[in-house]
Amino acid sequence: MEDPGRPPIILRPIGVIRSPHRTPAGTPIQPAYADEAEGEVVVDEPFERALDDIEGFERVWLVYWFDRAGPFAPHVVPYRDTREHGVFATRAPNRPNPIGLSVVRLLGRDGRVLHVSGIDVLDGTPLLDIKPYVAEFDAHPVSKAGWLDDRREDRRVADDRFHGAGKT
Amino acid sequence: MEDPGRPPIILRPIGVIRSPHRTPAGTPIQPAYADEAEGEVVVDEPFERALDDIEGFERVWLVYWFDRAGPFAPHVVPYRDTREHGVFATRAPNRPNPIGLSVVRLLGRDGRVLHVSGIDVLDGTPLLDIKPYVAEFDAHPVSKAGWLDDRREDRRVADDRFHGAGKT
């Protein structure tokens, strides 16, 4: 069973993500399919200075909490396939620690607000961290992607399969 | 000050990262500079099945906890420059929520152990999540990288500037 020796970790959200996506159904499943969607990343006042110089980056990583995800499910049927896969082999939200990760385009900064596009995150999602996207570190354009390379579905927007409690 | 309305979030590490890097000083600052370094990602038993089908991916994201980072610092002098920048414009660990993110090459899986290379993480680091690297979502090879594009330092290994308490 779960290792009782691992102490819990306490996070405090640093702000909130604002987007046009109010419900899981219809939300793009990845920023790559959300080019038109604009949103705002609002950090709380104690963290405003930590944004300094972010304006120079074309893209940023948003690290956030899937606050409306269903419970952990070891296996899921992801949007892009019709078969089950281990949840760590998918980007589905039903993870042991439901931490989300999306790269968005940075349009500009206004104090403690970042204006972004290509957002696939639900409105009101708690923000945990922001990191600059650095192609030298993060871009591996040729990288084999397992079942996704052989996928049976080309779905680009979500339904509600991962969000109701016990809906997995 | 910090928004008192944001409830805390409790995480439970799902395993541990094993690497040859025992101290911050000398550790590669990014996986891109750690090609030779091999390590193991060990998930706890309740999460073993969630790894199913991960073998097909060439790279995976490790999401982890910077357990030896110093306290939050709004501004830091990153390894790749000689000037201060906001911490959200850097990959330094002194973040409000010290969540780390590294893409590593997946060499193979043995039950609940992933063998990986290109690891820039300290030995014993608590693991929070594993996600498949999907070039279609994650690779933006041409993406302007602010101060990093004009950097004054080409340092590729760490010193201890971010790890002692108050060492910022």
Image (spheres, coloured by chain):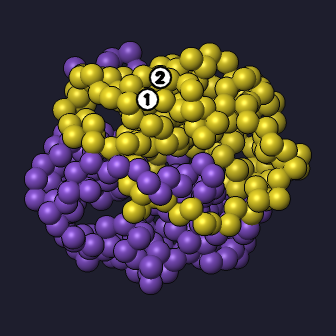
Chain colours: A purple, B yellow
Residue B50 makes an appearance in the image: no
Q: Position of residue A6 (x, y in %)?
A: 40, 21
Instruction: Check disc 2 and give the amino acid type.
Output: Gly
Secondary structure of the residue carrying numbered label 2: strand
Q: Residue at (37%, 74%) from the top-left corner?
A: A33
Q: Is residue A72 left or right of residue A123?
A: left
Identify the residue at horizontal 27%, vertical 72% (top origin): A156
Residue closer to the observer: B7 or A98? A98
The answer to which image quadrant residue B89 occupies is: bottom right
Q: Residues within 10 Å of mark 2 (few under 14, many from 20)?
A: many
Q: Which residue appears at 60% of the width and 66% of the height?
A: B142
* Up/down of A27 relative to B37, above or below: below
Please tell me whether residue A144 is drawn above or below residue A133 in the rendered image: above
Kind of residue at disc 1: Val
> Is residue A168 shown above or below A121?
above
**Residue bearing the label numbered 1:** B116
Residue B7 location (% of width, % of height)? 46, 50
User: Do tag 2 and tag 1 residues touch (Cβ < 8 Å)?
Assistant: yes
- Mark 2, residue position: B39
Question: How many marks can you see?
Answer: 2
Q: Residue furthest bottom?
A: A36
Chain containing mark 2: B
Q: Quadrant of the N terminus of chain A?
A: top left
Give the residue displayed 26% in from the left and 73% down from the top.
Answer: A157
Q: Chain of mark 1?
A: B
